[in-house]
Image (cartoon, rainbow, N blue to C red):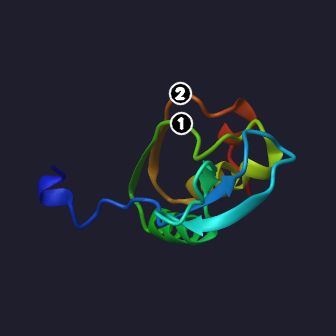
Amino acid sequence: MAGEYKDKLRLPVDSMAAESFSADAARINAALGQIPKGWESLDIGAKTIANYTGELADAKTILWNGPMGVFELEPFAAGTKAIAVAVAKADAYTVVGAGIPPPLCRRWE
């Protein structure tokens, strides 16, 4: 479905998964497809953060619509924060859509 852009489409490769929707829940970084049964994916994982921030460093146009995870719960805010920093540092035309909290929208130096 990605057509001519399929080589540029980047999907998550891992996830910060938690036993329940709670800041105090047990959590693991798991490859997609390896999340334990009954657990929830609440943020992007470390490898995905590295992949995405690497791609953003070279981007000329960035369209970002929404957070990477449940940023309202601190243990699951790392992905959104890392992407916000990468977007702010990129020398790119950037459009940020709904769902990103105002403190993450400012330019971080």
Q: Give the residue displayed 19% in from the left and 58% down from the top.
A: 5
Dot 2 and dot 1 residues touching (CB under 8 Å): yes
Q: Residue furthest left?
A: 3
In the rendered image of this protein, does residue 59 appear above or below residue 25?
below
In the rendered image of this protein, does residue 11 appear above or below residue 31?
above
Q: Give the residue displayed 60% in from the left and 67% down from the top.
A: 30
Q: Give the residue displayed 30% in from the left and 59% down from the top.
A: 9
Image-based side of 103 in relation to 8, left or right: right
Q: Residue 21: x, y in percent?
A: 73, 39
Q: Quadrant of the C terminus?
A: bottom right
Q: Nearer the viewer, residue 30 or 4?
A: 30
Q: Which of 50 and 94 is in front in this view?
A: 50
Mark 2 to mark 1: distance in Å?
6 Å
Q: Name the amino acid, label 2.
A: Ala
Q: Nearer the viewer, residue 64 or 26?
A: 26
Q: Mark 1 points at which residue?
A: 66
Q: Residue 94: x, y in percent?
A: 47, 44
Q: Mark 2 points at which residue?
A: 98
Q: Nearer the viewer, residue 88 or 15?
A: 15
Q: Name the amino acid, label 1.
A: Gly
Q: Badge 2: few (under 14), some or many (20 or more) residues near its Cα, within 10 Å?
A: few
